[in-house]
Each structure stands twice: as structure tokens, then as C-alpha cells.
Image (spheres, helix red, strand yellow):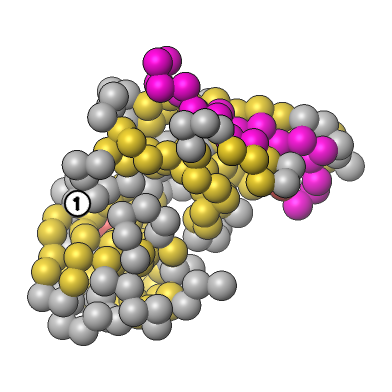
Amino acid sequence: RKEVEQDPGPFNVPEGATVAFNCTYSNSASQSFFWYRQDCRKEPKLLMSVYSSGNEDGRFTAQLNRASQYISLLIRDSKLSDSATYLCVARSNSGYALNFGKGTSLLVTP
Amino acid sequence: EADIYQTPRYLVIGTGKKITLECSQTMGHDKMYWYQQDPGMELHLIHYSYGVNSTEKGDLSSESTVSRIRTEHFPLTLESARPSHTSQYLCASSVNYNEQFFGPGTRLTVL
């Protein structure tokens, strides 16, 4: 079973829409969680960390549900520039490795 | 903007050749990583270093080797390239075990 699982999409949404992605993680010892963004044929870049209490950064909101072992990312007022693949990432405190999901593809259309 | 560089960006090479993928960072990060990513697939950690003269193998078995003689430099070597090595190789560095900064990647094609 993969450590981190995501719906690959693609999610096609119009500009201005709200879109939400979920991902699940299998290792209950995972302590740190992140969302990375990867543009086509580019390197991943950190979008935001995910805190237990949930956190918001502008139009982006991340939530963590430890009981169900899932993480979510909500994007409000989608922009064309939000089109990318969003990678869900988990790390256990006992390990150095970041476990990446395959990513969820988002396409925002005019 | 992260200062981590990889060369070459693209490499097409024949089977059996020895290749070295270069990775350098100017941020003074102790920790450096090599990931392999196939199209549409997740990143897999193949090598990791937590400082000079330390290297560890990652979760994905790889025939490549790495060295860490200087903090800023973490090259990856394939002694004899094969078509199965065709992939994108991403180098990353970090201060702690959380946020990692990635280089632009090397797209390797072995014919």
C-alpha cells in the first residue's frame, strides 16, 4: 500500500471556482504534512505546511484529520495560474524521508 | 528563490556509458537528497546525505552512487547507464527535515 494516496484528477474548474483536494496517508506515525505544487516539467515547490489546527494562506486552506488520516487542500477563487499538479506529502518524525503522493492535476479554465 | 542547481538539464546517452549528474546549492544546507520521478508518478527518494562524508540509500533501490565531499556539492553517478535508468532526477536540500528546496532536475534518456 502506498504511503500517500491522492486522486490524480484531472480537476477541470472555471476561473473563480472553489476546488478541494484530499489525500490519505497510511502511516499513523506521520507527523509532518505538506502540500507542494509542481508545474509541468518543473521541480516541486512548497505551497504550504499543514498544521493540526488547520491553516490558511490567502486563497489556500489546508486541513489535517488525524483520526481519518487525511489531509485536504481548498483553493478559493481559482486563478488560471493555479493550474498545476498538487503533491501531498507526509513525513514521520522517526524518518528523514518525505513520502510524496502522485499528485492531483488541476486545470483552471477561462 | 532557492539557490540549487543541477547540470545537465537534459542528457541523452548510450547504454553502458558512465554519467555524473551534478547538484550544487549555495544555501549552506546540511541535508541533501536525490529523487527519481517518472512521468505521472510520485517522487522516490534514492539517496540522502545529512552532512559532509555521510550518505544513505533511500527507499527506492538504485544502481547509482553519490558522494558528499563538500557541503554544497552532491553529485550522483551511474557507472553503466541502461535504458531502465531513463527518468527525471531531482536534487533537493533542506535545513531541517521538513521543507525541501528542489533543483530544476535532470531529464536523463538512455538509448
Give whichever of B88, B111 is nearer the camera. B88
Residue B79 lies in the magenta-colored region: no
Compared with residue A89, is residue B37 higher up or lower down, i.e. above or below? below
The extreme right residue here reads A110
The chain ID associated with circle 1 is B
Q: Quadrant of the N terminus of chain B?
A: bottom right
Image x and y of residue B94, in percent? 35, 64
Q: Residue at x 30, y 81 (%)?
A: B72
Tell whether A105 sits left or right of A107: left
Q: How many marks?
A: 1
Image x and y of residue B78, in percent? 19, 69
Give whichever of B67, A69 is nearer the camera. A69
Q: Residue at x 21, y 60 (%)?
A: B48
Tell whether A33 sits left or right of A3: right
Q: Quadrant of the C terminus of chain B?
A: bottom left
Crowdedness near tag 1: few (<14), some (14–19) or many (≥20) residues, C-alpha within 10 Å: some
Disc 1 secondary structure class:
loop
Q: Residue at x 47, y 77 (%)?
A: B3
Magenta extent: A61-81
Compared with residue A11, is residue B106 higher up or lower down, i.e. above or below? below
Q: Quadrant of residue B5?
A: bottom left
Give whichever of B31, B10 is nearer the camera. B31
Q: Is residue B26 visible?
A: yes
Q: Amino acid at mark 1?
A: Gly
Q: Is residue A108 visible?
A: no
Q: Residue at x 66, y 32 (%)?
A: A74
Compared with residue A6, is residue B12 higher up or lower down, i.e. above or below? below
Image x and y of residue A88, in percent? 47, 38
Image x and y of residue A5, in percent? 42, 27
Circle 1 residue: B58
